[in-house]
């Protein structure tokens, strides 16, 4: 089944963080990635162990299991997910695209965890968090 899923480039919405305590989940996900399956970010934010917003542990597990670069993982969580939902240009910063935006101090390529604690959140055109305005 893994080979067949890979040949079809099956799209998998991940819940690796939630399921990581279950035996063989990460091993099977790695085999699926090696076979050619495509991974998209997913998170069970209603789960008690998962932070609201972006689950950086999920992003880190996707990267670890699949060998994707940070940039590829971020695309899997944004533009690729939007395409798969049939909602492109969702997940892209382009004119006319529906978007909530976050900004962080630092480089997610060096530390994905900073995405869990954004310094700026704009949702529906409204500033929800703006720690940048509090800085000298």
Image (tube, grey):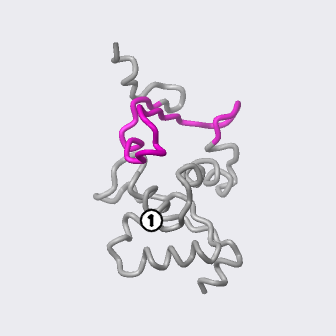
Residue 13 place in picture, x, y as percent? 54, 64
* Residue under pointer 1: 15
Residue 35 in picture, x, y percent from top left? 62, 77
Residue 35 horizontal side relative to residue 18, left or right: right
Residue 34 % position (x, y):
59, 75
At a point 37% along the width and 65% down the height, the residue shown is 18
Residue drawn 53% across the image and 31% down it? 124
Tell me residue 110's x, y (percent).
44, 45
- Extreme left residue here? 48
> On the picture, is 90 further left or further right than 129?
right
Which quadrant would the N terminus be assigned to in this image?
A: bottom right
Q: Main secondary structure of the magenta part?
A: loop
- The answer to whether 2 is drawn above or below residue 97 in the figure is below
Extreme-front residue of the structure: 110
Span highlighted in magenta in the image:
92-121
Q: Is residue 72 magenta?
A: no
Tally of numbered discs: 1
Dot 1 falls on a residue whose secondary structure is: loop
In the depicted structure, whether residue 68 falls above or below residue 107: below
Q: Which residue lies most toward the top here?
A: 136
Quadrant of the drawing holding the C terminus: top left
Callout 1 crowding tier (Cα within 10 Å): few <14, some 14–19, many ≥20: some
Whether 10 is drawn above or below 56: the answer is: below
Q: Residue at x 41, y 59 (%)?
A: 44
Left-right relation of 63 to 83: left
Q: Residue at x 53, y 66 (%)?
A: 66
Q: Which of the 4 image quarters holds residue 6? A: bottom right
Q: Quadrant of residue 53?
A: top left
């Amino acid at each position: 089944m893994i080979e067949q899923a890979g040949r079809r480039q099956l799209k998998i919405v991940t819940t690796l963080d939630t399921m990581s305590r279950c035996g063989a989940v990460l091993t099977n996900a790695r085999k699926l990635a090696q076979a050619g399956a495509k991974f998209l970010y997913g998170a069970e934010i209603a789960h008690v162990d998962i932070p609201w917003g972006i689950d950086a542990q999920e992003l880190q597990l996707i990267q670890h299991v699949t060998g994707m670069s940070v940039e590829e993982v971020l695309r899997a969580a944004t533009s690729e997910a939007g395409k798969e939902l049939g909602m492109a240009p969702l997940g892209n910063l382009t004119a006319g695209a529906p978007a909530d935006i976050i900004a962080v101090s630092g480089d997610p390529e060096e530390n994905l965890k900073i995405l869990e604690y954004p310094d700026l959140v704009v949702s529906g055109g409204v500033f929800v968090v703006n720690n940048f305005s509090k800085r000298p």
